[in-house]
Amino acid sequence: MTDSPTELAPALAFAPEKTRAADAVEAARDEILELSHRIHANPEPAFEEVQAATWVAEAVGRHGYAVEHPVGSLATAVRGRVTGGKGSDGPRIGILAEYDALPGLGHGCGHNTMAASGVGAAIALAAVRDLWAGEVVFLGTPAEERGSGKAIMIREGLFEGLDAALLYHPCDRNHVEIAPLASEDVTVTFTGLQSHAASDPWKGRNALDAMIALFVSVGLWRQQLPTHCRVHGIIEEGGTAANIIPDRTRAWFMIRSADQRYYDDVMRGRFVQLCEAAAAAADVEVSVEFSGGASTMKHNRAIADRWNANALTHGIADEGMDPSSGSTDMANVSWVVPAIHPELSITEAPTPGHSTEFRDAAARPFADRTTLLAATLVAQTALDLLLDPSLVQEAWREFRGEG
């Protein structure tokens, strides 16, 4: 990337306006990066992002946004709104932020950079509000790692009326299009009967036996699964003592597929069958609870093209689709409003996400530069939409499959 966020190509659409937005990000540099580092140093898991949500709400509130916190049913959700200086008759553009961390790992997905860059973009757009008509809607979205907070916010109408939604994600490479897997969290609980494991084990019904049988079954199932599928889990509760037959065990699984129909028609039902078979084998009861559904992505190329044009002026070329993919509830958003979820590198070398190395990278100078760049690119792409009604129309035509 270039050293200065204001070095824009002369031929770029709305170059003077975008230069002002980039300058606004630079002017708020210290505030943006301090927020990123503060969230990184205070990781909070899904639905528990009390401090992070408060900090982002306060930050956008300081820059003229009318803030609702909480908003909807989620205590850690945030909405801030600001109207353009040329009036409210214009596009409504959603600027999103994530801030939940991974249990036991912290910000191993770099969501601190996503929160700070979303706030930074919101700051920049408020700073140039004299240029545009319409509304910028900042949405602080909890529980991306588990629980799909955006899906809940969609159901509660918080994305209604938006014309586009923009959210950057950190990565170890630069690209605008992603292909996330359809995914759900599954809590599996087996319930049996306690007894003394030595003196009279025959009087018990072993819930741990069922759990072990389930993990073995999942391992065998993987041999026959298509390459676009993933199944993985951990035992959260496995018993209380070696000399007590466990009467209760609990696991957290995630099941995923790049093919939404295959996931819906095959994977979900088959996983339930494996759980029921394990319960029958151990003569225990089973509860299977699905939650936090994330879908595949409906990528919007019209908006992505503008992102790429803006990124090129900063020396960032699209490296093409990432061969690796996880899941995200941003994909759910893409089915209700035109959206992109571009990724920018925060590392010097290939680095797996959800790792201690990626977590540590998210607070280093390279990630700081990326956070500011992401704020700039989100703001500049939002300006494309706010200042060019034809782009909004094109994005919606593509979204609706109208040619």
Image (cartoon, grey):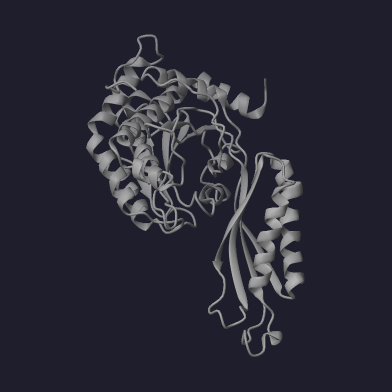
Relative horizontal placement of residue 220, taking residue 248 as reference (left or right): right
Residue toward you, 240 or 14: 240
Residue toward you, 202 or 88: 202
The residue sitting at the front extreme is 198
Viewer can see residue 134:
yes
Give the residue drawn at x 49%, y 57%. 73
Give the residue drawn at x 57%, y 40%. 331
Residue 248 vs 43, above or below: the answer is below
Relative horizontal placement of residue 285, taking residue 160 as reference (left or right): right
Give residue 260's position: percent from left, percent from top. Answer: 69, 41
Relative horizontal placement of residue 79, taking residue 279 as reference (left or right): left
Relative horizontal placement of residue 3, taking residue 256 as reference (left or right): left
Residue toward you, 87 or 94: 94
Give the residue drawn at x 38%, y 44%. 357
Count up the numbered dots: 0
The quarter of the picture where the C terminus appears is: top right
Viewer can see residue 191:
no
Residue 129 vs 33, above or below: the answer is above
Give residue 49's position: percent from left, percent from top. Answer: 39, 55
The quarter of the picture where the N terminus appears is: top left
Give residue 289's position: percent from left, percent from top. Answer: 64, 62
Q: Which of the 4 image quarters holds residue 178?
A: top right
Give residue 246's position: percent from left, percent from top. Answer: 61, 78
The residue sitting at the top extreme is 11
The residue sitting at the bottom extreme is 199
Q: Which of the 4 image quarters holds residue 200?
A: bottom right
Residue toward you, 147 or 53: 147
